[in-house]
Amino acid sequence: MAQRIAIPAGLLPDDCEASLALTNAALPFPQSEVNRLSRRRYILDQLPKNSVGAEIGVFRGHFAELICKHVQPRTLYLIDPWTLLGETFGWGKGVYLNGGELTTELARQETTLRCARHPSTECCIIEGFYPDCADMIDEPLDWAYLDASHAFEDTYREVRALATQVKPGGLILGDDWRPDPTSFQHGVYRAVQKFTSESDWEIMICGPAGQWMIRRKPSYE
């Protein structure tokens, strides 16, 4: 069952730094992914500051923290199933999951610590599967960043749901744009292409660093 996750009260920046340093020493985030964060950052230039946004698919909160720093949103909804998946993520035992040792609870905890370092943004952390937990988003969104399952049917469902939660003039963007049909992330490409082909949404950005962005087609009436 979906639930809101509270950020522990009274956390000081030094406390967050110390805790994150310990977990990163034990279970480091791959340097290739750290480098990729900087390559993805350009897409955030399109987002307005002091806005209301959501990230669907949060993992350990690294990109969420980048959003807080770069976009400085007023409110940021962070949605991920975390422990609803079980003790571990179950995606294999590669370096991204530290050989399978990274737990879902630790990933969720890291996200709360990263949020606590940015008190000027109200971070609303929701443990749940989107769009099943969509009603836990309390207000219309200026934008939403999608980085969830990557499966075609799931992504298509997620994009359709987000289109109903984003304000007129708002944006949907995300990660892992892979036109190559042999890529295991190709479902994102297929889902966005299908959605835009049958709706009044259009692609604005696609490709560099795997980023993509769509918007409703402007009306010239």
Image (tube, rainbow, N blue to C red):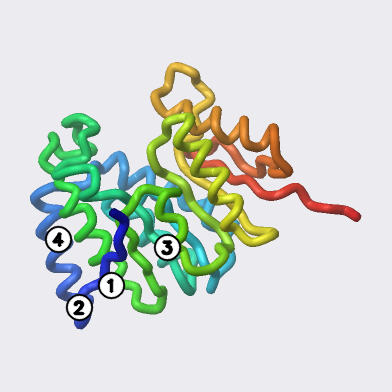
Residue at image position (66%, 40%) is 203
Q: Earlier in the sequence, mark 4 or mark 2?
A: 2
Per the image, the residue denoted by label 1 is 116
Residue at image position (16%, 41%) is 88
Nearer-the-camera pick, 47 or 55: 55
Query: Which mark is nearer the camera, 4 or 3?
Result: 3
Residue 65 locus on image (x, y percent): 35, 61
Marking on residue 136: 3
CA neighbours of label 4 inside 10 A, class few (<14), some (14 to 19), many (20+): few
Spatial separation of the CA atoms under disc 4 and disc 2: 15 Å
Q: Amino acid at mark 1?
A: Ala
Q: Earlier in the sequence, mark 4 or mark 3?
A: 4
Query: Which mark is nearer the camera, 4 or 2?
Result: 2
User: Mark 2: which secondary structure?
Assistant: loop
Marking on residue 11: 2
Per the image, the residue denoted by label 4 is 21
Q: Amino acid at mark 3?
A: Met
CA neighbours of label 2 inside 10 A, class few (<14), some (14 to 19), many (20+): few
Spatial separation of the CA atoms under disc 2 and disc 1: 7 Å
Q: Earlier in the sequence, mark 4 or mark 1?
A: 4
Q: Earlier in the sequence, mark 3 or mark 1?
A: 1
Total tally of numbered discs in the picture: 4
Q: The C terminus lies in which quarter of the figure?
A: bottom right
Q: Amino acid at mark 2?
A: Leu
User: Mark 3: which secondary structure?
Assistant: helix
- Name of the residue lying farthest toward the right: 221
